[in-house]
Amino acid sequence: MFSWLEEEMTAEAEELFNLLYTKDFDSSALRKELNTGRFSPEDVNRAAIDYVQTCMDFRRGDQYNGEERRYGETVLGYEDSHVVEALEVLLDYGLDPNKRYVELSDDGSIRDCWNIMYELWTTGNGYQAADALYLLLSNSGDSSLKLDHLTILDEVTDDVEFEINEREDMDDYAFDALIHFWLVLIGFGGKSVNGSCPLDPVHGFDLSLLRNHRNYYYGEIYTKESKDGWQYCIFDRHTNREVARF
């Protein structure tokens, strides 16, 4: 299902957005407003994707005012601290994980396409993005959803590969968050447009286990077999055993 992101938000969608994009989020207050029946499923979906897209500015990590950060732990008291909690409420009021929004070119063709599951990856506060993706994929989200000519997995894999090679846009915490987001997507069976998966399991590992992303971590090992001398791997956090290669 497509909608047009170029259209302005309705007053109702904007009202919901303001309840989401706040440092003082209150899930009970959000649910109370939604229970009034004034908000359509379209209002819910539009407010949700605009909220997630606005949170993308937090990927650089410099907005946390020097607070101590730990891998996988949410920094509380920010607009992106409650993404999972907010989306959990919105699912009860018509949030569609597979809804796509498009931007049109002058000739009427589709220039760009957005979906809330893909937009989540830019949220780098702890594992809010990975856990929110897990939530949406557990509620009818399509892990191989096609965005224009590529799937979500294609897009996220491109982002992972770029950050591995360049690491220009992200701090280490945001990069770790991206990796865990990617693992969840693969763990739920995400495939590229040609039906392939970017990770190769080793030792007979079941890639579906990656949806439990906290049990795994990303690492690099030096090997003469690789063109650049490095092999990019996923390891079991408890045994430090390699389970997959990129």
Image (cartoon, grey):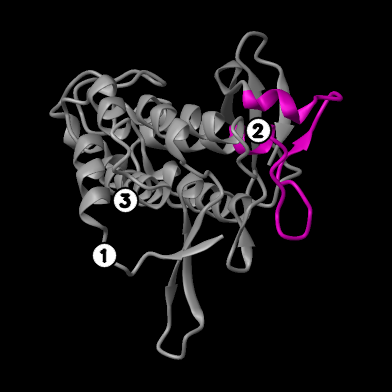
**Mark 2: amino acid:** Cys
- Secondary structure under tag 2 reads strand
- Secondary structure under tag 1 reads loop
The label number, if any, that marks residue 233 in the structure image = 2
**Mark 3: amino acid:** Asp
170 relative position to 15: left or right: right
Marks 3 and 2: which is nearer the front?
Answer: 3
Residue 102 pos. (x, y %): 46, 68
Badges 3 and 2: C-beta atoms under 8 Å apart?
A: no
Pointer 1 residue = 8
Q: Give the residue at the far front of this rendering.
A: 37
Q: CA distance from mark 3 to mark 2?
A: 34 Å
Residue 54 pos. (x, y %): 27, 48
The label number, if any, that marks residue 114 in the structure image = none
- Classify 58 as above or below 218: below
Which one is in front, 133 or 203?
A: 133
Badges 3 and 1: C-beta atoms under 8 Å apart?
A: no
- Classify 235 as above or below 190: above
- Secondary structure under tag 3 reads helix
Q: Earlier in the sequence, mark 3 or mark 1?
A: 1
Q: CA distance from mark 2 to mark 1?
A: 43 Å
Q: Could you tell me which residue is drawn at 35 percent across and 29 percent down?
A: 86
Q: Can the viewer see residue 17?
A: yes
Pointer 3 residue = 50
Q: Can the viewer see residue 176?
A: no
Q: Earlier in the sequence, mark 2 or mark 1?
A: 1
126 relative position to 239: left or right: left
Q: CA distance from mark 3 to mark 1?
A: 11 Å
Instruction: State the extent of the magenta-drawn residues as a range.
Output: 183-211
